[in-house]
């Protein structure tokens, strides 16, 4: 459920009509519903009330400060993969103790920063990283709380580019090396083993891969404990999918996901860490775009909009589906025909939807690309010298611009011409 609905035939974000925002801010823009964001976080976190759980929002999915602050006020922690994301989380009011630092390429400077602010957990992904972390912790005179991210070699059954738990993926310590890694960590200065971590991928629509991975992880925890390792936290990552296409398979409800996890790990008597991103913010955001023109050829009918792949790259990168709907509702008996909805970027891949059945549109009509709150704005760029688009947050009958559209001068003046020119 989200809070983007038609009222008297006009698509609203909570109590604000989208045409009003478009008129005042211009298109394209991202629009987030704070009510949806809060609702999704609350439903997810309350599903795990049976065991001690910290929900660390995956900052990589949406790093806007207004989004992070909304979640921080609800009690969220943060799953981060860079120093920049750690800084964003702390600036939003998330305490360092509730920040997890993941990622295969943590640099020396990033590690020093994270140690300096006292983050709650490093998810270590290689033996080399462990050595670097030990060295930096000793230099600073602190102790690094770690969990090894273990790769269980489970195929998540999702898109190849967002599967992370197979032995051919770059993430985590190989399953076969896990016990040796924990034995080594137990002897190293500046290192304190606190848990174990696992994340097998994103946009999973079945519980089966999760269950397989979590069962393997549980067995590993039991083995490690018998060897004298104190595993007090189990970090199960994120990855639960959201419904992108109306009428298609629905992912499991958070309560089903929670029940499966509780049944699997409750006997371990561990603190649980979860790192949802898309599940919280995906359907809390839309991308609103205007029709530039239509173009009809012998083979295709095109709707050309002012948003491009630089604004939302998921359809181009992942062949991802996003429902696309008009801001002004059409009659149920309106004649529809197939259209390709495309952007202005000079790439054939700049396509949001192919052969979508839609009522014909005209120049300046508004379209909403749904389920764009996750991995939308954060992956945007200025390709084709197109300025980053605004982000808007709605709260009841009010809205605020939470990222402004830069001017062309601001964009161009970021470049520096050397003296010899």
Image (spheres, grey):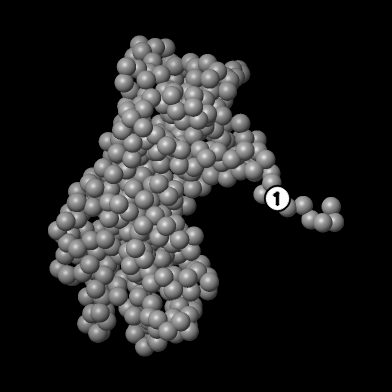
Residue drawn where x is 26% and y is 42% of the image = 39
Residue drawn where x is 45% and y is 61% of the image = 87
Inspect this view and state whether residue 151 appears.
Answer: no
Of the pair 99 and 218, the residue shown nearer to us: 99
Q: Position of residue 73 (x, y in %)?
A: 30, 52
Q: Which residue is mark 1?
A: 415
Residue drawn where x is 36% and y is 88% of the image = 187
Q: Position of residue 247 (x, y in %)?
A: 31, 31
Residue drawn where x is 48% and y is 74% of the image = 112
Q: Position of residue 269 (x, y in %)?
A: 17, 70
Q: Position of residue 174 (x, y in %)?
A: 40, 71
Quarter of the rendering containing residue 99? bottom left
Q: Is residue 282 above or below residue 52?
A: above
Regarding mark 1 in the picture, which secondary structure is present there? loop
Of the pair 375 and 10, the residue shown nearer to us: 10
Q: Is residue 362 above or below residue 325?
A: above
Left or right: 376, with 261 as reference point: right
Of the pair 341 and 60, the residue shown nearer to us: 60
Neighbour tally class for label 1: few under 14, some 14-19, many 20 plus, Cα within 10 Å: few
Q: Is residue 154 above or below residue 376?
A: below
How many numbered marks have been drawn onto this rendered protein structure? 1
């Amino acid at each position: 459920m989200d809070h983007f609905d038609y009222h008297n035939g006009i698509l609203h974000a909570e109590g604000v009509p989208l045409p009003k925002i478009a008129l005042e801010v211009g298109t394209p823009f991202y629009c987030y519903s704070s009510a949806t964001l809060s609702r999704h976080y609350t439903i997810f976190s309350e599903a795990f009330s049976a065991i001690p759980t910290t929900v660390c929002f995956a900052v990589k999915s949406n790093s806007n400060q207004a989004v992070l602050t909304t979640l921080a006020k609800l009690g969220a922690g943060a799953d981060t993969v860079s120093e920049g994301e750690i800084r964003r989380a702390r600036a939003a009011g998330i305490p360092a103790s509730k920040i997890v630092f993941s990622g295969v390429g943590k640099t020396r400077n990033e590690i020093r920063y994270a140690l300096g602010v006292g983050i709650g957990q490093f998810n270590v992904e290689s033996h080399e990283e462990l050595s670097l972390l030990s060295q930096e912790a000793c230099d600073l005179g602190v102790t690094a709380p770690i969990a090894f991210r273990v790769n269980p070699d489970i195929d998540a059954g999702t898109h190849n580019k967002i599967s992370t738990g197979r032995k051919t993926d770059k993430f985590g310590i190989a399953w076969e090396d896990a016990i040796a890694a924990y034995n080594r960590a137990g002897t190293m200065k500046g290192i304190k083993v606190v848990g174990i971590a696992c994340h097998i991928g994103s946009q999973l629509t079945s519980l089966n891969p999760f269950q397989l991975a979590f069962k393997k992880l549980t067995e590993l925890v039991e083995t490690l404990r018998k060897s004298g390792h104190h595993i007090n936290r189990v970090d199960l990552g994120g990855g639960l999918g959201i419904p992108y296409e109306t009428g298609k398979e629905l992912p499991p409800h958070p309560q089903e996901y929670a029940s499966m996890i509780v049944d699997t790990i409750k006997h371990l008597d561990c603190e649980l860490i979860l790192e949802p991103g898309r599940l919280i913010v995906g359907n809390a955001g839309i991308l609103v775009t205007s029709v530039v023109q239509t173009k009809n050829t012998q083979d295709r009918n095109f709707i050309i909009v002012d948003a491009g792949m630089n604004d939302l790259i998921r359809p181009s990168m992942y062949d991802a589906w996003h429902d696309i709907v008009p801001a002004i509702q059409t009659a149920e008996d309106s004649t529809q025909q197939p259209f390709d909805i495309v952007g202005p970027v000079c790439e054939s891949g700049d396509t949001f939807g192919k052969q979508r059945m839609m009522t014909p549109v005209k120049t300046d009509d508004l379209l909403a690309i749904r389920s764009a709150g996750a991995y939308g704005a954060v992956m945007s760029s200025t390709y084709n010298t197109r300025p980053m688009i605004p982000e808007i947050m709605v709260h009841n009958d009010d809205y605020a611009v939470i990222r402004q559209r830069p001017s062309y001068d601001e964009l161009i003046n970021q470049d520096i011409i050397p003296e010899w020119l």
